[in-house]
Amino acid sequence: MVASLAVPSALRPLDRQFYGRDPKRVARDLLGKVLVRPADGGSLTGRIVEVEAYLGTNDAAAHSAAGKTLRNAVLFGPPGYAYIYFIYGNHYCLNVSCEPEGVAGGVLFRALEPLSGIQEMARGRGIKIESDRDLPKLTSGPGRLCEAFCITRDRDNGCDLTDPKGGLWIGEDGFRASKIAVSPRIGITKAATRPLRYFVSGNPFVSGRKTLPAFDTPV
DNA sequence: ATATCGATTATCT
DNA sequence: GATAATCGATATG
């Protein structure tokens, strides 16, 4: 089993200042934090192992690149709020707004390591967990983790992620993420080479490539 | 293990 | 009318 797979204790929410910074810094610092979905009979929780930074300006891949619209308004609002969008006619994806109010920016949640509420997550995903090898199918990928946590735009867009009494929030328990790697972002066509994806190297819950590609040794 | 492709719809041109 | 910050299934090596 994975070292960080432990039931979080004494989770305390991250404050708004944490999010009111450059998305690159927020993304890096979110690794190892815990996403919490309170529910009857026990919260769903998962440790963040993969994220991507989307810069409000000067980033063609960001939804905020072309300016504020009804859809992306949360990205231009105050930091620490959930921006949820619907993609490919099938999936929701979760972001948190960054930067001070009036400045766009966000972090996309790409993968979690499930900590508690495994059965609820499996039900949300509509799959059965036969062994530990099936666990990554719960929350490995931005669409999957939203399905596992029952995150939808109607329910959660604009939700305050700093509020532990709210329906969705992010906490820390003292765990320190290590072996952090950076790579280009996944699934985009614009600004596709910028290294803005942050992940825990080798963690089995990371989506796609879980390590940095090897390179030839110079002669 | 990697590659390709279809599903399905909100949003913007 | 085209596109998309994806996923799961199928095909092929």
Image: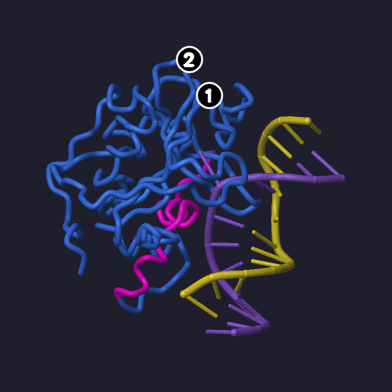
Chain colours: A blue, B yellow, C purple
The image quadrant of residue A14 is: top left
Q: Chain of mark 2?
A: A
The answer to whether mark 2 and mark 1 are in CB contact below 8 A is no
Q: Which residue is mark 2?
A: A102
Q: CA distance from mark 2 to mark 1?
A: 12 Å
Q: Earlier along the polypeptide chain: callout 2 or callout 1?
A: 1
In the image, residue A158 lies at what x, y percent? 46, 30
Q: Quadrant location of the C terminus of chain A? A: bottom left
Query: Seen in the image, is A191 located left or right of residue A55?
Result: right
- The residue stretch that appears in magenta: A132-153
Q: Which residue is mark 1?
A: A57
Q: Tag count in the figure?
A: 2
Q: Residue furthest top?
A: A102
Residue occupying image coordinates x 21% and y 65%: A2
Type of the residue with mark 2: Gly
The image quadrant of residue A208 is: bottom left
Query: Seen in the image, is A94 located left or right of residue A90?
Result: left
Q: Quadrant location of the N terminus of chain A? A: bottom left
In the image, residue A32 lies at what x, y percent? 24, 46
Query: Seen in the image, is A183 located left or right of residue B2?
Result: left
Residue occupying image coordinates x 44% and y 41%: A108
A169, above or below B2, in the image? above
Circle 1: is it few (<14), some (14-19), or many (20+) Cα within 10 Å? some
